[in-house]
Image (spheres, rainbow, N blue to C red):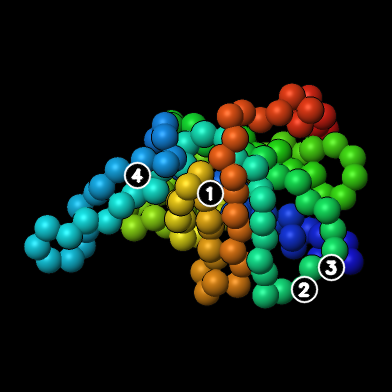
Amino acid sequence: MMKKLFALAAVLLTIAACGGKDNPDTPSPTPGGGGGGSTTTKVDVTGSWELSGVETKVSVGSVNVSVYITFDSGGSFTLYQKIGEGRYSVFTGTYTMSSDNKLSGKYSNNAAWGPYTAALSGGKLTLTSAGGKEVDTYTKISSIPAAVSGNTY
């Protein structure tokens, strides 16, 4: 069971790291790879987010998981994660968002994560793992709640 919890934690941490600009509901167009004047809309995920949904094709049991993340415009993130009861663990690192909305990065210990395909709609950020084995949804929030940031290890 502990192995499954750590696997779930690793997946959630990986998914949580995103990048972008100030307003996640207003994507900015970037040149596309196709012919003519095609464009790809680059997802902007800068700001604070709360995990609001997880769909996985791998059984991880029923564990309460709470995740909050803030992405800054300089390419850094701070992630707060609580699995089960207790306090939040804090993880930091850097992220990049490619022009085709592939999100990837590194934790401060240099462990790499991603890529995840990012999509944004109506204040909801969806991150899909390679192969679609996991889809996580985050909801835009104004800031990380003090009850979270003040309740860490």
Is residue 95 visible in this depiction of the protein?
Answer: no
- Circle 1 is placed at which residue position? 124
Q: Is residue 59 left or right of residue 133?
A: right
Residue 44 image position (x, y, % from top left): 41, 43
Which amino acid type is marked by label 4? Pro
Quadrant in which the N terminus appears: bottom right
| Residues under numbered marks 2 and 3 in contact, where contact means CB atoms less than 8 Å apart | yes
Residue at the left extreme of this rendering: 36
Nearer the observer: mark 2 or 4; the answer is 4
Q: Residue at x 71, y 74 (%)?
A: 58
Q: Residues within 10 Å of mark 1 (few under 14, many from 20)?
A: many
Number of marks in the image? 4
Q: Which mark is residue 27?
A: 4
Q: Is residue 49 left or right of residue 35?
A: right
Q: CA distance from mark 2 to mark 4?
A: 34 Å
Answer with the quarter of the image where residue 149 lies.
Answer: top right
Q: CA distance from mark 1 to mark 3?
A: 25 Å
- Circle 3 is placed at which residue position? 61
Q: Which mark is residue 59?
A: 2
- Frontmost residue, 122 versus 131: 122
Q: CA distance from mark 1 to mark 4?
A: 13 Å
The mark nearer the N terminus, 3 or 4, is 4
Vertical relation: 68 (above or below) 114? above
Q: Residues within 10 Å of mark 4 (few under 14, many from 20)?
A: some
Vertical relation: 112 (above or below) 59? above
